[in-house]
Amino acid sequence: MVVGGSIGAVRTVQALRREGYGGRIRLLTEELVEPYDRPPLSKQYLAGSRSLDQFTLLTQEEAGKLDVEMMLGVRAVGIDPDWDVVELADGSRLSYEHLVIATGSSPRATPWDTVEGVLSLRDLQDADQLRRALDSATSIAVVGAGFVGAEVAATARGLGVEVTMIDPLPHPMARVLGGTLAERFIKLHQDRGVQFLLSTRVESIQKNTSGIQLSLSDSTTLTCDVVIVGIGTLPNTEWLSGSGLQLTPGLECDATLTAVDDADILGAGDIVSWPHPLAGGEAIRIEHWTVAAEQGQQAGRNVLLPVEERKPYDQPPYFWSDQYDTKIQSLGLPGRAARLELLEETEDGSRFVYGGERDGRLVGVIAINAARRLGSYRMALADPPGFEDLRAGIAADQKALGAPARAA
């Protein structure tokens, strides 16, 4: 049984069949629509350039061909590991031999009073509501300058909506980009008309006849038509409370994505906390599409193996973000770096690569419009080199290739 309608859940059932599993497979999702991709929600779908059928992950017809029983609108509310059953909202119980949990994450609740027009973005229903709101809006406030907030800001500007981004930190996307690199993205958005209120907190949100009013920590007030709040997420583990599984706050798994408390239960995607070599073996939780997809494939393979033969998931985490005509790609764990340093840049400054160093070694990379360079860094992160050795190697490569890119 696979619980969840995420990319991790879909990749799990596909991997099971690809690996030759011939038993019964059930996929349970509480949403009423077939599983779909999430990245387009803040970009192409929100802009109206892609329809749902263009990013559906698994149709009922495709599930039938895989001999997967896909159950839509079915909400799991608990697990009884002693009896190997999943408890459903309607009071029924479904048994399993092996269980893969891929229920993803949800936006953090806002600390302000509920106000009409204050929205979040995580699923299709949220995206539809935001699309309708933007149709008649002239201004939007984006509270939380993370990657999803930045993508929504870019999409809204493309629709001609005035955008103000607000964040208590001094830099957008600061937890990954750091101060130096983040300055480039302030300019990227400012050049397209986005206003920033950084190092600024929202104290309260109210609505009156003039619109939605945000009272800010600098004693000013901002009025707009729509507010989108992106202040982080929490893993969807509340339904696992009382199961005896360790939740810290994600489902705690070992390196093979097997729950530390039950070898018959595995996890995939945003819900999983697992030890990663680049984090020194510390348990981490990563909310990125590629990680979820790869973990789903690994969980599907591992569930068919004896515990002692299961393989670890130790790929360098990867994600991307499209903002205007700029593609941001991250590999490894640059957010855990002690410092970020420019490693490569083209002469016109349109493409560049930053490396993250911790304890003298490479831990992560951020590439801007430089996708072709990621392959070599992926190989480097498999056995992280000393940072100075890496810099020297880049300089030697550029010299040998006579490439226009220069080592920083």
Image (cartoon, rainbow, N blue to C red):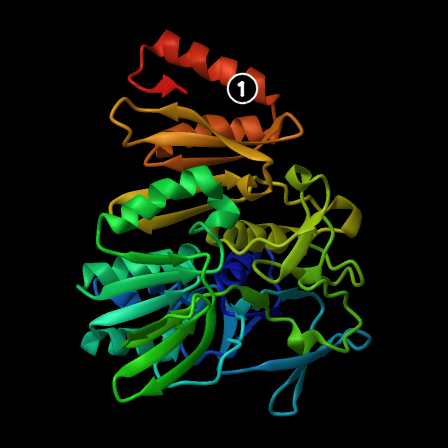
Is residue 131 rendered to the left or right of residue 2?
A: left
Q: Position of residue 379 (x, y in %)?
A: 53, 27
Q: Is residue 302 above or below residue 362?
A: below
Is residue 33 rendered to the left or right of residue 73?
A: left
Nearer-the-camera pick, 136 or 219: 219
Residue 81: quadrant of the picture: bottom right
Is disc 1 surrounded by few (<14), some (14 to 19) or many (20+) residues within 10 Å? some
Residue 272: quadrant of the picture: bottom right
Residue farthest front in this picture: 219
Give me the residue at 51% from left, 69% from top: 68
Give me the residue at 62% from left, 54% from top: 285
Q: Amino acid at mark 1?
A: Leu
Question: Which residue position holds label 1?
Answer: 390
Q: Quadrant of the N terminus?
A: bottom right
- Disc 1 element: helix
Q: Quadrant of the C terminus?
A: top left
